[in-house]
Amino acid sequence: MIRYLTAGESHGKGLIGIIEGFPANLKIDINSINNELKRRQMGYGRGGRMKIEKDEVEILSGIRNGKTIGSPIALFIKNRDWENWKDIMGIEKNKLDEDRIVTRPRPGHADLAGAIKYNHLDIRNVLERASARETAIRVAIGNIAKQFLKEFNIEIYSHVIQIGKIKIESDNVSIDKIKSADKSPLRVVDSQSEKKMINEIDKAKKIGDTLGGLFELIATNIPIGLGSHVNWDRKLDGKIAQGMMSLQGIKGVEIGIGFRAAELLGSQVHDEIYYDDGYKRYSNNAGGIEGGISNGSPIIVRAAMKPIPTLKKPLKSIDMKTKEKFEAQKERADVCAVPSASIVAENILAWILADEIMIKFGGDSIEELKDNYNRYIDYVNSR
C-alpha cells in the first residue's frame, strides 16, 4: 500500500527518498525528522564522518502547510562532505588519479562481490552505495512512518543489550527504562554494563579493531491482526526479519525469545491466554506475533550486528587489478555503530508497521483510515 525508493552515494551530493501512498492530511513535523537524524548520528564509538555531517532533511514535495496532500513525498539530505569529493564523485566525465581508484576489496564488505557483479574496475562504484550512509534517508522516511503510527498510539522503542561479549544484566527491562535509553552514550539502560562496554570499545579502538553487538526493539499498542498466515510473503515476522536484515551489518534477527525457544519445552515457550476486558497473555515469548499475525502483545525484535569490517588495522586482501596481496583499502569508519543501528532499526520497523496499517485499514485520508481503524477496534473488543 505504501512504498519508497532511495538514491544517493555516500560522498555524492546527497541522499534522496521518494515515498508513495501515504494518506492525505497527516500532520508532519520536520523537526521530528531532524531530531531522528540527530539520534542516528549519536553513540559512543562513532567515527569522524559524524563530525562532518549534521544531517537535516529538505522536503521537496508532497507536504503543504504541515500536512501530507496525498501525492508523492520527496526528501533530500545534503552531504556536507560533497565539496571535498566532487572531483572524484562528480557525474561529468573526469580522468581520475590512479591513486584514487579503489582496487583492493575489504573483507566483510560488498566490495569484491559488487565489483564482479556489476563489472566495475573501480570498487568505489560499489562501496559508495553499499555504505551505511544510505541509512540517513531511511531514518527520515521512517520518521514519517513513526508520525503516522502515533495517530494510532503505536510507539517504538529500542535499547542496546550487548556489545562484544558484554551483556546487560537483566533480560526483562521495563518500557520506562527503555524510554530513557537516549540518555546513555551507548543507549544502554544498565549503567554498570555500559561502563564495561565502553571499556571494550576503547580497547578495540586502541588496537585498530571494531566491535558489534545486539539491540532490542519494542513496539507497543499493536492491534491484533496485522500481517497474515495465508501466504509466505504476508507474514509479519517474515517482513520484519527481511527489513532488519536489509540494515547494513545485521547478521541475525530474533522475534520474541528467538533462538532460546529451541532450548526449552513447549510448555515453557508458548504464551497462555486469558480474558480480562480483552484477550491477553501471561507472557510474551512469541514477541507479539503468532502464525505471521500480530496477537495484540508488544512486538519484540532483536538483531545482531557484526563488527564493522573497515578496520584501522586492515585485513589481508588482494589487488583486483594486479592480483597481488595487499592490505585492504582503508576508509573512514566507526569502531562501533550498534547504538546508531538501533535507531535505524526503529525506523525500519516503523515503516513495516505503517505499511501493515495501510494494508489492513486502507483510506486516502488520515480521517478515513482512522474511521476504519476505530470500527475494527470496536469489533475486536466485542469478540
Image (spheres, rainbow, N blue to C red):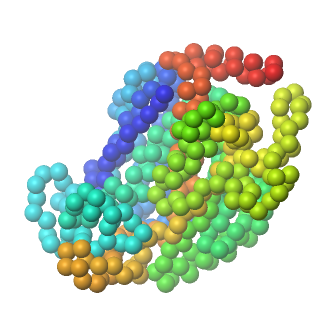
Q: Height in image: 284 above or below 234?
A: below
Between residues 161 and 377, which one lies in front from this camera angle?
A: 377
Exactly how many numbered labels are in the figure?
0
Q: Which quarter of the figure has residue 360?
A: top right
Residue 279 visible from this viewpoint: yes
Residue ID at (31%, 71%): 105
Q: Which quarter of the figure has residue 324?
A: bottom left
| Residue 167 x/y as whole percent | 70, 69
Tell whether 263 sits left or right of 240: right
Tell whether 279 sits left or right of 12: right
Residue ID at (67%, 50%): 255
| Residue 213 x/y as whole percent | 59, 66
Q: Height in image: 330 above or below 69?
A: below
Quadrant in which the C terminus is drawn: top right
Q: Height in image: 276 above or below 134?
A: above
Q: Height in image: 345 above or below 221?
A: below
